[in-house]
Amino acid sequence: MNKVNKKSLSLVILAAGCFGIISALIMDIMGADNSFRGELLIVGVIAFLGGLYLYPTQKHHKGIINFIFLFPLLFCFAVTVIIPFGLGLFYSTTDWNGIRLTRFVGLDNYKAMFTEISFLWSLIITVLFVVINMIAVNVIGLALAVLCTSKIRGVGFFRAAYFIPNLIGGIVLGYIWQFVFNNVVLNWTLQLFDYNSSMLSKYNTAFLAIVIVYIWQYAGYIMMIYITGLTTVPSDVIEAASIDGATAVQTFFRIKLPMIASTITICTFLTLQSAFKQFDVNMALTNGTGSVHFMGQYLTNGSQMLALNIYNTAITKNSYALGQAKAVLFFIILSIVSIIQVRVSNKREVEM
Amino acid sequence: MKERLLSLLLVGLMGASLVGCGGATEGGSAGGDAGKTIRLVNGKIEVDSQLKKLAEMYEKETGVHVEIESMGGGIDIQGELKAYYQSDNMPDIFVCGGAADFDNWDGLLQDMSDQEWVKDTDAAFTNDEGVVGFPYTTEAVGLAYNADILNAAGVDPATITGPESMRKAFETIDAKKDELGLTAVIGYYAEPVNLYWSTGNHLFGTYLDSGLDREDRTYIDMLNDGGKIDDARFAAFADMVELFNEYADQSLLVSGTYDQQILNFASGKYAFVTQGSWIGATMTGDDADAYAEAHNFECGMIPYAFEEGMDTILTNSPSWWAVYKDGNVAEAEAFLQWMAGDEAQKVLVMEAGFISPYKSCTYVANDPFAGTISSYTAAGKTSAWHWLEMTDGYSQNYTGQVFADFASGTLSKDEFIETFKQVTENAYAQ
């Protein structure tokens, strides 16, 4: 096969591929009933990639190969992340209700979001929840890790026992604890204080309940990471410290803690992110209920975190567009957190 | 060259597998186009097996396969349906719960006014597009009571006609609580997480409709006009709720579950319960043992008479089946017509415990409440369920919590009324 032939062959395949892709897409957008359009699209894509591969070029060969190998990943990323994100941005500027949209409202949804007091409340308690949990989960996780790396009996059992709550799904966990709070804790408070409502019915105690369950679920996981960190602390350093007469407390604060600084960074951001995204336990445990007076209004979503607020806005209150606008804000908050995380950990790595 | 061949082979293999996947998914959705299959999304998961039986009967008779997809148990069915709509996977028949739901699907539903069954019922859902909802059962909301206990306490339910007589009856029963083996007079639960619908929809529904004609839209129209509440009527309603709070089972008032509520009523621990006719199926099903132990006592319903002379219970179709316009309309309509017929009604009434909304149906379910409902219906003493037209999420996100706060004592009665109005305005401001 000479070069000219090869070139024209690859061009033909390329053109056929492009034609396949475009006609399949047009058919889909026009809503045609031809059921072969899916196959046509895939065959088109393959022909396009094949044509690219066969194209006789020295200069761009490497680039083409890279593209072909990256394509499946890029494609999946685009379909599952980029395109839905773009659609989400688009829908947040409309009055979409999940079925159809009638008009564009510009930035009205974003304005409505910030004048909605119940949403501001959700935002505030989410931040509060994140701060409390970031500290509590890390302190408790580290304490458990120290215990589980010490020389007590049955360490393996304790490690497993603390870790197991993390293996139970959040919804199941929420229902289990709902039972505990409503049937066990309630009986105690009824007998001791003649107090007839469960912990979950007041926003402040309900919030406390979510914090407790979250710590119970997550501390074991964080403990595992800390254990890995603690076991990498070289034993000769610790031995040297003990020869110098350092107490256990001194060894912990002066030697171990600085040595696992990078682990602490990782765990801090892990808890920060997952606490922000708290949804399942919140939904199963209280579904956001609990009344509270805030900014002169009686709110009924006293224990509703941000993610649950978004879900309820879209699904139960049937305003998908407003929920989408809130989700965009949620995305911005989370990306800021992620960017800071990447910065901080990069800096640390350089220092180490 | 060998390498190149190998790589081409791999590309081909990958392509083939992709096409295979694509073909499979296409094949899945193409099933609907065959013309001999229809899909029904059912919102009452408790009758799933009976519906599947009906679908089998129908397939034997006509050769049309009916796929029953049941949802329930806390799933937001409308949300789920919207996801189906987005993914171009709509069922041919699906459940709609009221005006708000039907409005969402405006323009996408089939007008069935030319169907035979329409003439046979008063319960079809009609809007300006025509008859869009097929009714399949009737449910009633009234203050359910245990006739044996009321007898033993010497209270005649017929004498409870207003707030004073209701209070008197409660006091009489409360005085004899121990000898009757009662935990509390009334099984009223105001738990806000999972039972918000009981207070926020059904109990509040009596404020909207109790004592009124089926066509009377006074209070729902007021409510839907920016969330207005009638002061005098609501104050009387609040008095009744206060009475319930006082005589309820204190340990479960703000935290009990639906299951506990029905089980305790079925075991004869409460004289009254604030649930509707649907609990009959649970009492004779899941709770059959406890109910038998309580000697399968007789049940009845009295009106929620928070004003003197209110004499109606609230009955309605709780939801309807709608036909999707772009689906398999002809087959779906034929199936619904068959469902309204004698053969299917027999299964629905006798096995699923439904109370038929069809006049030609002569079956009466073996349900503790079936008799009560028929007698109220025959006497014309029923009101509608206009709460179905309240704004989306009103009970779940707003009022359920207010009832719970009132029950736990956080809010006094005056605060309850004031707060209720405020959250209502908020709910309607959106």
Image (cartoon, rainbow, N blue to C red):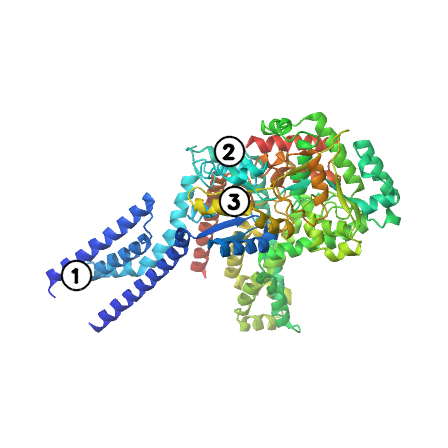
Q: Chain of mark 2?
A: A
- Indicate left or right for A6 with B387 as reference: left
| Discs 3 and 2 lie in a common subunit | no
Residue A223's place in the image compared with A131, above or below, is: below
**Front: mark 3 or 2:** 3
**Front: mark 1 or 3:** 3
Near mark 3 (Cα within 10 A), the count class, few <14, some 14-19 or many ≥20, is some
Residue A73's place in the image compared with A31, above or below, is: below
Q: Residue at x 63, y 51 (%)?
A: B352
Residue A340 picture location, percent across and down = 46, 50
| Discs 1 and 2 lie in a common subunit | yes
Which of marks 2 and 1 precedes in the sequence? 1
Q: Secondary structure at mark 3?
A: helix
Q: Secondary structure at mark 2?
A: helix
Which corner quadrant of the image does residue B402 belong to?
Answer: top right
User: What's the mark number on residue A56?
Assistant: 1
Near mark 1 (Cα within 10 A), the count class, few <14, some 14-19 or many ≥20, is some
Look at the image and tell me whether residue B92 can be seen: no
Q: Residue at x 58, y 73 (%)?
A: A239
> Gap between marks 3 and 2, in whole Å?
46 Å
Q: Marks 1 and 2: CB-CB under 8 Å?
A: no
User: Mark 2 highlights which residue?
Assistant: A112
> Gap between marks 1 and 3, in whole Å?
66 Å
Q: Residue at x 24, y 56 (%)?
A: A48
The residue nearer to you, when weighing A37 against B320, is B320
Question: Hey, what amino acid is under mark 2?
Answer: Ala
- Indicate left or right for A187 with B141 as reference: right
Q: Point out the image quarter for the N terminus of chain A.
A: bottom left
Question: Hey, what amino acid is under mark 1?
Answer: Pro
User: Mark 3 highlights which residue?
Assistant: B337
The residue nearer to you, when weighing B217 against A127, is B217
